[in-house]
Amino acid sequence: MSVTIVTGASRGIGKAIAKRLATSTLLLVGTNKDKLSQVVDEIKAAGGTAEFFAGDVRDAEFARAVVARAMQLGKLTNVILSAGISKGGGADKFPDATLRDLFDVNFFGSVNFAKAALASPELQNIMFLAGTAGTRGYSSMTGYCASKHALVGYARALAQEVSKRNIRVVPVCPGPTDTDMTAGIVKMLVGKGMSEKDAKAKIASGDNLETLLSPDDVADTIARIIDEDLLVINGEPVPVKPRPTVSADALQRLKDYNAMIAASDARLRAAARTGHDEGCECVACGQAG
């Protein structure tokens, strides 16, 4: 039985990842017991298997306890490290305590689980949700970017260490995503007179996106990495692209095309059985499909 740990699973990207990977046995980690319980119930209702652990990712003993439970349930193959916090502010006045909080949660919180998971002989994937803040800089986000850059550096080095075990270490780097973390920025821009749609577009434009990514966009990328449907270089950041959208008109045209193919196939099968031409409209051919 394949087991996957997902941290930060009570909301946003972590929750979307958990629901996307519901075919695996899941151990969900977060701080909000009630929200975690709701996610577990949703996964079970869809036929999946899941448990939750409410606790502090900054606690290395807690991380080891979750990993131990995962290895009791089956083969711990995937660890998806999505827990994180975001705090902004100018570098000159940024409180030292807040900077430490960012590193304690975003960096050390993920490292605690990565280190503990290395005890699993079946481990295949360690994924860090670093975001584009792990590969570039954002004004007034020095502390947040530094904590995410540290994750990318750690992932690159760890990939070198564990490559002989065929473990992939992947920093996943989505751009601005429509979650609680961006909601505050959207609210600030709306307060300045911008529409919500325009506010989201403005945030997204900083990463050359037309609109914010969705948590499901990130979850799909994670799933493709696990399924080996997406080429990755061990240790190197993987960007996230929006899922392609299909209009209702395009879906209807696809249905019409499939119906046409099915009807044509029925006529061909009737002709093969009766020996009549494909276009024959006799009772035998008409009933054959």
Image (cartoon, rainbow, N blue to C red):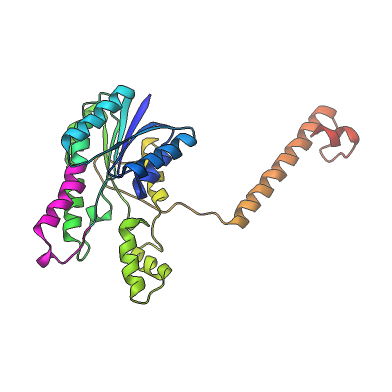
Q: Is residue 62 left or right of residue 252?
A: left
The magenta region covers 87-109
Residue 256 or residue 273, whichever sits in front: 256
Instruction: Look at the picture and state if 94 lies above or below 224.
Output: below
* Quadrant of res 246: bottom right
Residue 186 or residue 287, whichever sits in front: 186
Give the farthest residue toward the front: 34
Task: Say which quadrant the C terminus sits in.
Answer: top right
Residue 79's spot in the image, x, y percent? Answer: 29, 35
Q: Assess whether residue 88 is covered by the magenta stretch.
A: yes
Residue in view at x 72 percent, y 45 percent: 260
Residue in view at x 73 percent, y 37 percent: 265
Q: Assess whether residue 92 is covered by the magenta stretch.
A: yes
Q: Is residue 58 left or right of residue 125?
A: left
Q: Is residue 101 left or right of residue 68?
A: left
Q: Is residue 230 visible?
A: no
